[in-house]
Amino acid sequence: MAQVSVSSAAQATIGDSEFDRDTAVTRREPGVYDIDLSAGWTIINAVNGGYLLAVLGRALGDALPHSDPFTISAHYLTASHPGPAVIRTDVVRTGRTLSTGTASLFQYDDEGAEVERIRVLASYGDLGSLPDDVRTSAKPPQFPPVEQCFGAQDGPSPVEGSSAITQRLDLRLDPSTVGWAIGAPSGKGEMRAWFGLADGRDADPLSLLLAVDALPPTAFEMGLKGWVPTVELTVHVRCRPAPGPLRVSITTRNLAGGFLEEDAEVWDSADRLVAQSRQLARAKLR
């Protein structure tokens, strides 16, 4: 069983936390939402892809008759930056147990023209209505307890430029996956960590969309450096997470042609697999 908490800081609550405020969207009219993307979730000079997915996920949760993301697939078209953005949603289909919709996020270039940043297709439902029957061969990742893992304060910034997102997360990395931080990467495409939000807010289905893309890239442990931008990311949310820290395990088996895949699993404090994802990302080889 996982430990009860990652941080002893005062707990923020779901609906009243920095994550909730920074992913809040304002409905301008049916299917159109406004948001000011926060600089607090940037890495290098771009907004983190998991944060963006949570923003779009929140808009779709308002636009669709169901509130919980079951599966959401995103294509990242151009890098997003802090500042105003517009989200446009479209309801594709509604049913008794699942509803499907699309959403796109737009920003403006220097001439004031709209530029599409990210486009998603998602199916939503009610996680609370799912049966309890679980048949699985998946096992929770095994790594040291929180106090034996490393946080952002224990090492240098992983990249040059903004690392503001690290101040909003409570990440504790498995020591066996931090060789890159001391110039001795393992050569394995693995990254594992305890995950929480810095203000103590418990996880919910929306924050799982952030968790799958919040760890340092597996490319670092493969000896590569620099930004690893996401091309496509698909997340499956399997159930509501129990209170307490999450364990995130990410692996890469194949880097070829300058692209790699990252397969993530997210486990909650009750040893349940609460989310899975796969993304295709571009790696800087030189």
Image (cartoon, rainbow, N blue to C red):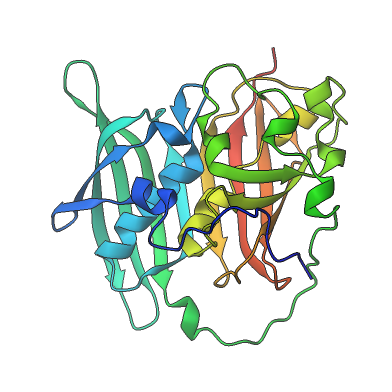
Q: Position of 125 compared to 101: left or right? A: right
Q: Position of 144 compared to 38: left or right? A: right
Q: Residue at x 52, y 50 (%)?
A: 199
Is 214 above or below relative to 63? above
Locate the N terminus by quadrant: bottom right
Q: Residue at x 60, y 28 (%)?
A: 228
At which x and y percent is residue 181? 78, 25
Q: Position of 91 compared to 118: left or right? A: left
* Callout count: 0
Q: Observer-nearest residue: 165 or 49?
A: 165
At which x and y percent is residue 179? 84, 29
Q: Observer-nearest residue: 251 or 197?
A: 197
At which x and y percent is residue 178? 81, 33
Q: Residue at x 48, y 81 (%)?
A: 128
Is 6 above or below relative to 281? below
Locate the C terminus by quadrant: top right
At which x and y percent is residue 136? 75, 75
Q: Observer-nearest residue: 86 or 157?
A: 157
Q: Position of 199 compared to 61: left or right? A: right
Q: Observer-nearest residue: 232 or 9?
A: 9
Which residue sits furthest left? 29
